[in-house]
Image: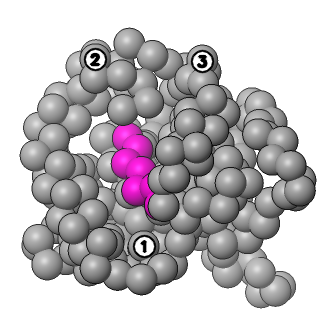
Amino acid sequence: PIQGANHQNHPLTDPYVEIFKKLKKEGVEAILAFSATGTLDEKVKLVDKKSFVVPSDYMRGYGFEPITANVKGHPHADVSEPFHNEMRRVILETGRDLKYTMTDGGIYVMSEGNQFESKVEIAFLNAVLSLGEKLTFPGVQHLSRRGAQVGMTAAKEVILSAEYKIPYALVACPVNLAAGMTNKRLSHEGDTMKVINDSKQYIRTLALETIARMKESEF
């Protein structure tokens, strides 16, 4: 894990560029990422209930710090399809065969950590996404609360994967309802870690089964 087996590293200080340079140098063919997230969609159950989201798009959120590997000859990466479609298909198919609840699509919004978002920040995101569901101009269909998640890492991984042209897909693992969506305060050391610990076997199984199928798939 980027943040270490015991979460000793933190999103704000993770050496993303160095990690992706190493992955490229080692000839990594694809990246299957798992990320703990807060859900903006209250209909999405938490990962300890065998519930996963496979996002279809992403957004750079609050406090996002620009990142680039300055790949020679490829200065402007295309991130209009940030998550590899064939990889997404395999993830969804695998999860459903395991009888997991798999949400197909949704926006992943990355805000810089190491803090959780505030109640107002989450309310603003939900308001914008809800408004998008009511508008009709071209492209607005991508704005929706359905499956929407917030996290602290994956947008940077998307960008660096695109720069290095490494196929990338994300599995979001909802560990809490985002700030302000319940009366409970968020606690990494409390409820969040309990959900993560209770779901490790589901995550591991989905990862291993998906990797095995990807080896048989062409993308």
CA separation in Å, label 2 and label 1:
28 Å
Answer few, some or many: residues within 10 Å of disc 1's Cα (few below 14, many 20 plus, some between 14 and 19): many
> Is residue 73 placed above or below 192 in the rendered structure?
below
Q: Residue at x 58, y 60 (%)?
A: 166
Magenta-span inclusion, residue 33:
yes
Whether residue 41 is visible to the viewer of this picture, yes or no, is no
Numbered disc 1: secondary structure? helix
In the rendered image, which quarter is residue 7 located in?
top left
Q: SS of the residue at dot 2?
A: loop
Is 202 in front, or is 129?
Answer: 202
- Callout 2 environment at 10 Å: few (<14), some (14 to 19), or many (20+)? few
The answer to whether residue 175 shows anywhere in this view is yes
Q: Which residue is mark 3?
A: 13
Asked if residue 188 lies left or right of residue 119, the reply is left
* Residues under numbered marks 1 and 3 in contact, where contact means CB atoms less than 8 Å apart: no
Mark positioned earlier in the residue sequence (3 or 2): 2
Q: Residues within 10 Å of mark 3 (few under 14, many from 20)?
A: few
Q: What residue did someone put label 2 on? A: 6
What residue do we see at 11% from left, 73% from top? 99
The disc label shown at residue 174, or none: none
- Horizontal arrangement in the rendering, residue 47 relative to residue 57 (left or right): left
Examine the residues drawn in magenta and state their main secondary structure.
strand
Q: Secondary structure at mark 3?
A: helix
Residue type beneath disc 1: Met
Q: Which residues are magenta?
A: 30-36
